[in-house]
Amino acid sequence: MQTELGRARLSTGEDLRLLGVEAPDAAWQGRLGALLGHKRAPYLGQIQAALAGPLGGLQTLFYVGAVAEEPVTCAVVAGAAGAGVFGHVYTVPAWRRRGAAAALHRALAADLPARGYRCLTLGTNPEGHARRIYEGIGFRQVTPGSGSMLWGDGQPPPGALAASAAEWADWGWISAAGCAPPVPGEDRPRSRLLGPGGPGHVEGPFAAALQEGRPLLALRQGGAAVGWAEFSPAAAAVLGAVALDFYVRPECAAGTGVLFAALPWPERPVVCAARARGPVLQAAGFRAVAELPAPLGTTLWLRA
């Protein structure tokens, strides 16, 4: 399904048609697949799956600037429940420096609120030219000098807490949770399995986890993902245990018990490296067994 967003005149005189194309769309599948075929995993897999058919509750919007029905510039927003990830900004080399991308960004910035989006995350080179383009449509760096950027307030709605298997529809809010402001004494990194050493977007690792079929659990508040947990067999070879990795937004920390209650705790021992989350781990039956030196600088907890 496509929506007309307007038209623009390029600096070289061509007429640029601006569209919002919601996947799947048979008329655009081949053209958009070819335009973004250079993308790498895990993003290429999500693009191909969204173009081919519905992807759970995830809405994938391809914002397109076309000349004579051929796409020359695009950007993609994928999300649900008001939060999404923004990326795949691309202009065909022969059409660059003619104003196509700028016109498309203005159009999508006006369209997104009408579609109910309240927050978006993205990752970019903090020193690159693209960062200034994103700032021009309302994105801001999560922390000074960061390549992670946030558009909107990023705050989840109020509501009941619940936990179940992570889904594609959680993508936007999971990444927004990773971008939540830091709090004093917070553990570093936020998540070893999803990657960020501090506040930052996690859309790539989350997409990879779903495509690999990993048993990732999501904590939701009012339907918006505010945390996650996962068991990893990484410690089995050394300690005969599985490792627990989890993160919950600081303002939603009371929901950690809900998340833990939904976990399929294994019969073998479980280890977790954390410092500030010690009381939560103690309540779940963990005990401190070692202090890990710098650069880890954290406590090793064991649940036998």
Image (tube, rainbow, N blue to C red):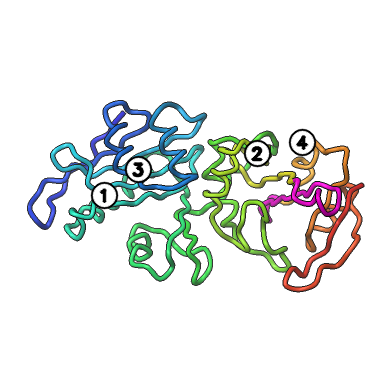
Marks 4 and 2, how far apart at CA: 16 Å
Tell me if residue 216 comes above or below residue 176 in the rendering.
above
Q: Which residue is mark 2?
A: 214
Front tag of 3 and 1: 3
How many numbered discs, if any? 4
Marks 3 & 4, CB-CB < 8 Å contact:
no
Residue at image position (92%, 47%) is 304
**Amino acid under disc 1:** Leu
**Amino acid under disc 4:** Ala
Q: Which residue is mark 4?
A: 262
Q: Earlier in the sequence, mark 2 or mark 1?
A: 1
**Amino acid under disc 3:** Gly
Tell me if residue 230 comes above or below residue 134 in the rendering.
above
Q: Using a 10 Å C-alpha cutoff, classify the residue at mark 2 as few (fewer than 14 neighbours), some (14 to 19) or many (20 or more).
A: some
Front tag of 2 and 3: 3
Q: Using a 10 Å C-alpha cutoff, classify the residue at mark 4 as few (fewer than 14 neighbours), some (14 to 19) or many (20 or more).
A: some
Q: Which residue is more in the foreground, 57 or 50?
A: 50
- Please tell me whether residue 241 belongs to the stretch shown in magenta: yes
Marks 2 & 1, CB-CB < 8 Å contact:
no
Q: Residue furthest left?
A: 13
- Please tell me whether residue 222 belongs to the stretch shown in magenta: no
Q: Which mark is residue 37?
A: 3
Marks 3 and 4, how far apart at CA: 38 Å
Q: Using a 10 Å C-alpha cutoff, classify the residue at mark 1 as few (fewer than 14 neighbours), some (14 to 19) or many (20 or more).
A: many
Q: Earlier in the sequence, mark 3 or mark 1?
A: 3
Q: Which residue is mark 1?
A: 104
